[in-house]
Amino acid sequence: GSCYQFGLGVAIDYRKAVRLYKKSATQGYGIASYSLGYCFLKGIGVGRSIDVAYKYFKQSANQDFSLAMKETKHLLDEHPNLERRQDRKSHGFQAGHRRDFPHIRKPINRKFIR
């Protein structure tokens, strides 16, 4: 992902960088989770979202990635209710209250859309 984010040997493509970071993050790479969090924090290749950035920073911090620990603490210092919002979103979504979370949409089958 970083090659596409910074244009190292390839043309810069932020969306492709985010896709690759997501793929690596799901495979358990802490640095990819951190990079994905950074993309969401700054709005690089995706819409800016502090909540999603925090989620990925926390995932990376749980894998002992020190930069992610620092970012997680920094976000919690700036947004004290962030942890509570994360818990509320998770609980409400699991309970089936989709109307309370309009920003979480049902996935679209993009198999034939390029």
Image (spheres, helix red, strand yellow):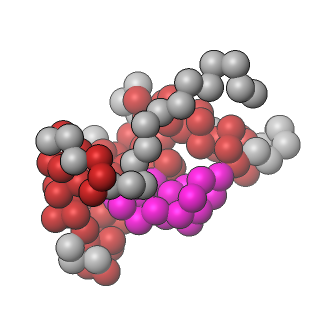
Q: Quadrant of the C terminus?
A: top right
Residue 106 in the figure: left or right of residue 113: left
Is 44 covered by the magenta stretch?
Answer: yes
Q: Main secondary structure of the magenta part?
A: helix
Task: Give the magenta range.
Answer: 37-54
Is 102 placed left or right of 69 in the picture?
right
- Which residue is painted at 41% across and 25% down in the image? 27
Which residue is painted at 15% across and 48% down in the image? 91
- The foreground one among 114 and 36 is 114
Horizontal and vertical percent position of residue 12: 79, 47
Magenta segment: does it hold 91? no
Q: Is residue 40 left or right of residue 64?
A: right
Asked if residue 111 shows in the view, the reply is yes
* Relative to 101, 50 lies left or right: right
| Percent coordinates x, y for residue 93 in the rendering | 23, 45
Q: Quadrant of the N terminus?
A: top right
